[in-house]
């Protein structure tokens, strides 16, 4: 039985639409989606600076010695008829080029043959584009649980490493806000007010010319 499962994925740059084939590791022990720093530099991916650093923690809760995540790459990912827009965090992964972690696995729930290493994208949520479907081509609606998983992956990444700050923020809200208004706690929260608007599947990057002045 295999100990690791790898995929050869096509990764397309959103600015030039040039694509490269990259080997990705499926890793349920990792939370997010990552691309190696040297891999991103070698293929000249356009880096996007994060609004806030993402602290990387080890299994025992300590901070990773390689530092925080400061940039990400936005790209289109293709695999056997499956296509999705993805944001991968840039980190030092050593010999591994790309890691697709538990958030990606939970969102797509792929069929994995652990004897052959074959991966089928047959249970993707409808938010994915150009995904493979069964022969009868039955279109199904996303279940409420699938929607929750996908939106959590996209929208909640900014909160990684801020658990203590979020907990303290919620405590202050409960002290200051009457109980009958707590169901609207997001309106009063400091952490919520600092989040970027929710990303949608149809979002597209707007690349400004270097000569542009606001």
Image: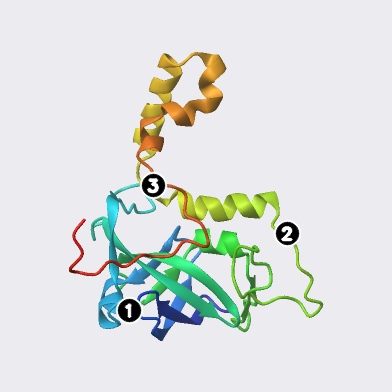
Counting from the top left corner in percent of width and height, residue 193 is at: 38, 36
- In depth, the one of 60 and 201 nearer the eye is 201
Q: Secondary structure at mark 1?
A: loop
How is colour applied across the structure in the image? rainbow
> Mark number for residue 196?
3
As drawn, 118 above or below 145: below
Q: Earlier in the sequence, mark 1 or mark 3?
A: 1
The residue lying at 35 percent from left, 80 percent from top is 16
> Mark number for residue 141?
2
Neighbours of disc 3 within 10 Å: few (<14), some (14-19), many (20+): few
Q: Quadrant of the C terminus?
A: bottom left
Q: Is residue 5 visible?
A: no
Residue 198 falls left or right of residue 93: right
Q: Earlier in the sequence, mark 3 or mark 2?
A: 2
Counting from the top left corner in percent of width and height, residue 112 is at: 63, 74
Neighbours of disc 2 within 10 Å: few (<14), some (14-19), many (20+): few
Residue 3 falls left or right of residue 146: left
The reply to whether the C-beta atoms of the residues labelled 2 and 1 are less than 8 Å apart is no
Residue 147 falls left or right of residue 72: right
Quadrant in which residue 65 is drawn: bottom left
């Amino acid at each position: 039985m295999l100990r690791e499962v790898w995929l050869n994925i096509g990764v397309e740059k959103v600015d030039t639409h040039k694509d490269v084939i990259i080997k990705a590791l499926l890793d349920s022990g990792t939370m997010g989606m990552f691309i190696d720093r040297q891999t991103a530099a070698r293929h000249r991916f356009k880096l996007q600076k994060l609004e806030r650093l993402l602290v990387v923690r080890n299994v025992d809760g300590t901070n990773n010695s390689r530092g925080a995540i400061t940039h990400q790459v936005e790209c289109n990912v293709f695999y056997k008829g499956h296509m999705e827009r993805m944001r991968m965090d840039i980190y030092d992964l050593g010999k591994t080029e790309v890691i697709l972690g538990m958030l990606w696995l939970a969102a797509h729930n792929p069929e994995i043959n652990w004897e052959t290493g074959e991966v089928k994208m047959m249970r993707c949520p409808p938010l994915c584009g150009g995904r493979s479907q069964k022969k009868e081509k039955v279109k199904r609606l996303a279940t409420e649980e699938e929607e929750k998983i996908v939106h959590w992956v996209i929208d909640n990444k900014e909160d990684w490493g801020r658990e203590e700050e979020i907990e303290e923020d919620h405590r202050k809200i409960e002290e200051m806000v009457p109980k009958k208004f707590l169901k609207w706690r997001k309106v009063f929260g400091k952490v919520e007010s600092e989040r970027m608007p929710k990303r949608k599947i149809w979002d597209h990057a707007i690349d400004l010319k270097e000569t542009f002045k606001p």
